[in-house]
Structures are given as structure tokens and as C-alpha cells.
Amino acid sequence: MKIVLFENPGCLEKPGFLSYMVVAVRYTSLTHPTFRIFAMIPSRVISYSPAYTVVPTYECFNQCAYCNFRAEPGQSPWLTLPEAELILQSLQNQGICEILILSGEVHPRSSRRRFWFQRIYDMCKLALFFGFLPHTNAGPLSYEEMAQLKKVNVSMGLMLEQLTPKLLQTVHRHAPSKLPEVRLQQLEWAGELRIPFTTGVLLGIGETQQDWWESLEAIARIHQRWGHIQEVILQPYSPGERQIWDAPGFDLLQLPEIVATARAILPADITIQIPPNLVQDDNWLLACLEAGARDLGGIGPKDEVNPDYPHRHYQRLPEILQPAGWKLMPRLPVYPQYDEWLSVELQASVKRWRMR
């Protein structure tokens, strides 16, 4: 694979952006080698979402070997609506826009599934009531559940992780909802329902390099059908204190090259996101931006999925970015091109934020 970056080509200058970058990447696709040029990346503006994560429950029927989030079913109290209300009240006028509703999963056939879903739905409504914009990631949902949550979310998300079925014999052996076809179906349903969506791949859990490209190509194909994927997260596996899997973290030296290849594979209107707390070396974070990443995701007090890796405060990030010529800009959890997909009520909530 060969990666060539051309910075600031004069023929690509355009009002509204400080500079552009042309990325040319040769990679091997599923069927044939391709040399593709992705041009005109607005290369000096980096976005992030001022966010806070609300967790209805940590309990989860999956047992992913690398997980540092889950609790055993029945061993984690559910967040009540009065407790959630107190949290949301305390966040008002704190500069937070996005409320990420991030939940462990209750089994689809569990008698508690309906109550679990209702709790999530009610917390989204509560977030809207207090003026925030909800984004839910609660694992695979039924088509009907997704349709209901569309009414109270400006966007939703689910990591594809990796498509290779061999992980079902290793880190996903006890994780039924990590079936690749189940997660692909979620991306299809989100497109059919016109839900602005975030997905991504998890790097370093036993997959191969070819698995990365196949997973990214699958995301690209689905987006080409529906046009609904806002962002793709490239998340390096980062070991924590609570997991049961004993493995080193992903080699971050590979990450800039993966970003550049992902930029070539994915359609131009999908933003590539890198979690800055998982790339703690400033130089490698900057290298990922040079390679084509343009978003840092939701930044808040705690990364619930990776609790051993605190977020850099958003006020600290400009100290890293500005000397290298980057400008950090806040964004909403729904991109402007998707506003018209939302209900009239949700559009009104989004418009209030866009007018600030």
C-alpha cells in the first residue's frame, strides 16, 4: 500500500477553508487493487461534540472479552428518571449540547426488555425537555425500536467493530449480539429509517489488515445505498482494568496509515473520527489528522467505554492543535445535511442550537 499526501495544492483553494489536502492511496479491495484519489479535505478544521454520557444501565448479556464497561445482569442498578433529571439539570448552561445515551444490553427475549427500552426512550425525552440533543447507542435494536427512538434522537450509533466471523470463536465467543449480520442489519435499517448514524471499527481485537478494509468497504456500500452515515470511528483497542482478555493495546504507529486508507475507501461525505483519549501521544494524534481524520467525537468528563483513558479537556486540545495549524470547532450530534430528516419538533430543537 502506498500513501501520498499533497498539502495545499493551489488549484484546490476554495473560500471557506484554510487549506485542502489530496490523499492518494493504493490498497487492495475485495476484488481488485485500486488507486483512488480523495481530494479536497478541509484540512485545518477539526470538529468535536461537547457531550455528556448518561448510562441507563451497565448490565449487559454480552460478555466481550475486552470490555471495560459491562456489569453482570442483576448486579448493576438502573439509573432512575429522577436521578437522570438531576444530572441533566446540573448540566444546563455548561456548554454541553449532546447527551449520549449509552447503555448495556438487555436480551431481546428478556421479560425486562420492554422496561429497558422505555427507560432509554424516556431519558431521551427528558434530555430534549432540558434543551439537549440526544444520541443513543444501546446495541442492536429491533426495527420497531429504532423507529421509536428516531422520534426522540437527532442521531444514533452502533459500532460495526469487525465483520470477520472468526472473532465469534475468540473475543466475541460469549457475545451473541456481535454477530456481523446482526450489526450490518442495524446499519441497513438506520438507512431505511433515515436515521443519521455513526458507526466504526475496533482495531486490534484479533482481526487482520484485510479484515479492516472489508469492514470499511461494507460500511461504504451501505452508505452508498442510503447516504445516512455521518461518521466512522477508527477506535484502537486500549486495555483496561476490568477486562478478562490479556492482550496488548493496538499499535498506534499503524493508525495514520489506516486513517489514510479509510479516507480512500469511504465516501467523501463520511467524516473519519479518532478518539483523542486513546491516542495519547500528541504527535501521533496530529499524524492521524494529517492523514484525513477530521473529528474527535464526543468529549466529556468520562469515556464510559474506556474509563481508564480520561478525555483531554476540550480547552486543552487547542494547545496541541493550534501550533500545528488546526482549528478546533464544536459541532452538533447531527450534521446540517441531515436536519431535514428529523421531525418538526427535533428540527426546532436543532435550530435553536444552530442559531446560538
Image (cartoon, helix red, strand yellow):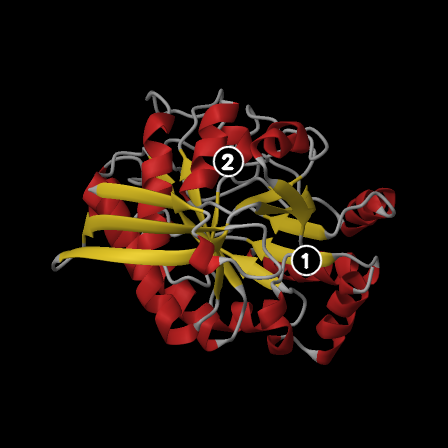
Dot 2 or dot 1, earlier in sequence: 2
- Identify which amino acid the numbered label 2 is placed on: Glu
Query: Residue drawn 36% across and 34% down?
Result: 255
Q: Which mark is residue 148?
A: none
Q: Which residue is mark 2?
A: 72
Quadrant in the picture for the C terminus: bottom right
Give coordinates of residue 236: x percent, y percent.
Answer: 40, 34
| Lateral position of residue 58 relative to residue 253, left or right | right
Query: Residue drawn 37% across and 24% down?
Result: 249
Q: Which residue is mark 1?
A: 134
Quadrant in the picture for the N terminus: top left
Residue in front for this viewpoint, 127 or 196 = 196
Give coordinates of residue 170: x percent, y percent.
Answer: 25, 35
Give coordinates of residue 283: x percent, y percent.
Answer: 48, 25
Give coordinates of residue 258: x percent, y percent.
Answer: 33, 41
Q: Is residue 27 above or below residue 14?
A: above
| Lateral position of residue 124 relative to residue 116, left or right | right
Q: Quadrant of residue 129?
A: bottom right
| Lateral position of residue 176 relative to residue 295, left or right | left
Q: Tell me the element at label 2.
A: loop
| Residue 348 in view here | yes
| Lateral position of residue 260 relative to residue 2, left or right | right
Query: Residue drawn 54% across and 33% down?
Result: 276
Q: CA distance from mark 2 to mark 1?
A: 26 Å
Residue in front for this viewpoint, 277 or 147 = 277
